[in-house]
Image (cartoon, helix red, strand yellow):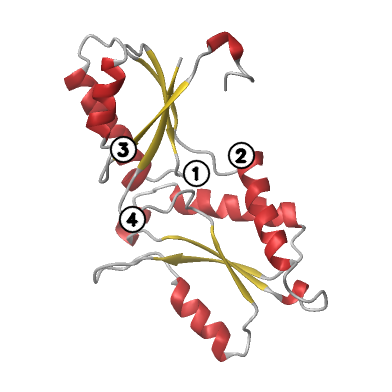
Amino acid sequence: MDKIHPSTAPHKPYVAFRYADPLTEDTFAKLLEDGVTRAVAFTQYPQYSCSTTGSSLNELWKLSKNMDPNETIEWSVIDRWPTHPGFVDVVARHVEDTLKTYPEEKRDGVVLLFSAHSLPMSVVNRGDPYPAEVAATVHAVMGRLGFKNPYRLVWQSQVGPSPWLGAQTSNTVESYVKKGQTDLVLIPIAFTCMLPASVYFNWAYY
């Protein structure tokens, strides 16, 4: 950041989680302690959902009202980036590297399964943009790959008895294996950091 945007340097990153250390409240206190006056909340979820990014931004807003009532920190927000060229290119390059591990005569037949965290259908039916934004990411990645391979978008981590967005990743894999299709690549298309039960923000100030 200092190199590409020197006019606002120096920049300093802060990390905050909803359910793991460092907690959002502790990071906010550190920002105030350090005298930060300009900050960017940068979610590490590429696709927006009210249950993840939305919930975290609401938490940030509440903390701002309670801990910084005089609004000494001016905030900007990066709340989604599902088709950012840099993100799409990184995912595509990882897929290409993986496909190169298959014999050349098999590569075009490898099935690509893009797996994202599922949502309850009650959230989807309220118009949450997450499924569409995940699908947009998959389409952008496949476009970058030239649509050479068969692919599917599947969903994981369903909990509880209520209906969730499907098809489920595990069921889809089992179905392919039963049909004799064992050349499968699983691609975590909505996860940029793998920490359980955490919502991750990267905060930078200048």
Residue receiving disc 3: 56
Sequence order check, earlier mark of 4 and 3: 3
Callout 3 crowding tier (Cα within 10 Å): few <14, some 14–19, many ≥20: many
Q: Give how far apart the Cα atoms at labels 1 and 4 are.
A: 17 Å
Residue 27 appears in the rendering: yes
Residue receiving disc 2: 84
Give me the residue at 42% from left, 54% from top: 194
**Element under disc 1:** loop
Do labels 2 and 1 touch, CB within 8 Å?
yes
Give the side of residue 77 with respect to residue 134, left or right: left
> Vertical placement of 88 versus 113: above or below?
above
- Of tags 4 and 3, the one toward the viewer is 4
Give me the residue at 45% from left, 79% from top: 171
Q: Position of residue 165 (x, y in %)?
A: 40, 64
Give the side of residue 32 with respect to residue 188, left or right: left
Instruction: Please state which amino acid type lies under the numbered disc 2.
Output: His
Sequence order check, earlier mark of 1 and 4: 1
Give the residue at the far right of this rendering: 105
**Quadrant of the rendering where the N terminus is positioned:** top right
Give me the residue at 68% from left, 54% from top: 92
Among the 4 quarters of the image, the one containing residue 201: top left
Instruction: Please state which amino acid type lies under the numbered disc 3.
Output: Ser
- Of tags 2 and 4, the one toward the viewer is 4
Q: Give how far apart the Cα atoms at labels 2 and 1 are.
A: 9 Å
Residue receiving disc 4: 196
Instruction: Please state which amino acid type lies under the numbered disc 4.
Output: Pro
Residue 125 appears in the rendering: no
Sequence order check, earlier mark of 2 and 3: 3
Sequence order check, earlier mark of 2 and 4: 2
